[in-house]
Image (cartoon, helix red, strand yellow):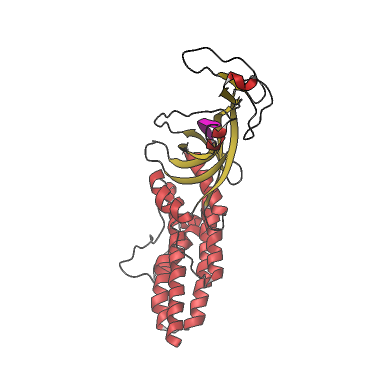
Amino acid sequence: MRIEKITHNPYDKSVLPSIVFEIEIKHTKYQEAIIGVHGWLETDDGKIVASINEIPKELKARELGARGSYLDKDFKEEIYKTKVIAQLTKQALDYIEKRRGVDRKKNVKFILNLIVKYIHSRAIVSPSYFINPEEIGLNKIVSQKEGKIIVYASDDRTSYANGWIISGDEGPIFLEVGEQLLKRDVTISSVDWIYDYVPKFGMGEYFIIEIPKGEKIIKEAWDYVEKAEKCFREWYIEGVCDNCREAGVVLNKKMKKEFGENSFTYNERWGRAYLRFFNFLVSLGLHLEDMKGKNWMELIKSLPKDFPHPKKYADYPADEIRLGKADAEHILIVTKLLIKYAEELLREKLLREK
C-alpha cells in the first residue's frame, strides 16, 4: 500500500483556513479494503500544525475475496481515491510563515502523515472438482440425473497446505483489521501560496509582496533585503529599517558610480525615487525616539511643496509615535521596487552603450 498521487488546494467550505488534499492510494483489490483515512500535517522541521480528517463521501461497497483459484489473477492493484482536510489555526499559519521565511525559495514545505485503516483478507480456498464415482473406484450413483461427487485435489496453478475447504492462510482467522502509516513530502510553491492560499486564508493584510529578483544584478542590495525579511517575520521593525537603509546606501553608491553625480539620471530620475519613496520613511523607523522635541526643518527643507511634511516641532501624543508591521511591510515593498528600478536603469544604460 502506497500513496500514488497528491494534489492540494485551499478548502472553501470551512470557516477556519483549510487545505484539502486529494489523494490516490494504491492497494490490492479483493485482498485489502480501505475503510478510513486520518492523520496529521507537519512542517518540514517536524512540528505538527494540523490534524487530518477524511471528508465524508458517497458510501461505496468494497469487496474482499479468497485466494487459491484461477481467479487469483483478479487480485491486482487498484486506486482508492479520497479527500482529506487540514484545518489551520492562526498560530499554525504564523509558524508556517516562519518556516517559509527560512526556505531559500520561500516555498511552504509539509510532511503529510496518513494512517490508513483497512480490512485484510487472509482467506484461501482449496480447489474442489466434480468427478464420476467410477473414476475413483466407486459405484455409479443411481439417480434420475448423472450423479457426481465433489473431491478435493491439488491444482498445479495454486498451492494448498491443509484439507480445509476454506482456511485463513493455514489458520482459522479469515479477516484482520490493520492500520498502515503512509508519509509523503508536499511542497506548495511560493507563487501558489501567495496567489491561491493567502487571499482565502485572510492573510493579505500583513503579507510581503513577492517581487521576482531576476538575475540579482545588485546582489549586495538583495542580501540586505533577505536579512530585512527575516527581521520582518520576527516582528523586529528596527531591523527591517536598518537593513533596508543599508540596501539603499548600496544602491545609491552604485547609481552614483555608474551614472556620475552630475548626471540627469542620477540626480533627477534616480534621485527623486530615492528621496521621496525611500529615505524618509526608513529614517523615521530608525529615529523614533528623536521625534520628541526635535526641529525637523533640516529634514524637510528639500521636500516638494505639496509633499506631506513632518511637524516643525514634534508635539505628537506619545502613543502615536510608533511604527508597526504595516510600516515595515511597506518599507520592504518599496525597497524591493527601488532595487528593481535601479537594475532597470542599469540595463537601459547597458543597451544604450552597445
- Residue 153 is covered by the magenta coloring: no
Residue 343: x and y in percent read 46, 73
Q: Magenta region's main secondary structure?
A: strand
- For this orientation, the residue located farthest to the bottom is 354
Query: In which quadrant of the rendered image does the C terminus lie?
Result: bottom left
* In the image, residue 60 above or below residue 227: above
User: Does residue 135 lie above or below 241 as drawn?
Assistant: above
68 lies left or right of 350 = right
Q: Nearer the viewer, residue 344 or 8?
A: 8
In percent of width and height, residue 321 lies at 44, 51
Q: Which residues are magenta?
A: 28-39
Total marks placed: 0
Please name the residue shown 56% across and 31% down the image. Answer: 31
Of residues 188 and 321, the one drawn nearer to the viewer in this rendering: 188
* Side (left or right) of 82 relative to 136: left
Residue sitting at the far right:
161
Residue lying farthest to the left in this orientation: 306
Asked which quadrant contains residue 8, the reply is: top left
**Looking at the image, can residue 167 be seen?**
no
Please tell me whether residue 38 belongs to the stretch shown in magenta.
Answer: yes
Q: In the rendering, at what x and y percent does residue 102 appear?
A: 57, 53
Q: Residue at x 52, y 12 (%)?
A: 142
Image quarter of the N terminus: top right
Residue 330 in the image: state x and y as whole percent: 42, 58
In front of the other: 34 or 195? 34
Q: Please indicate, yes or no, whether residue 254 appears anywhere in the rendered image.
A: yes
Q: Residue at x 47, y 33 (%)?
A: 54
Placement of 204 over or under 72, stated as above or below:
below
Q: Residue at x 45, y 69 (%)?
A: 340
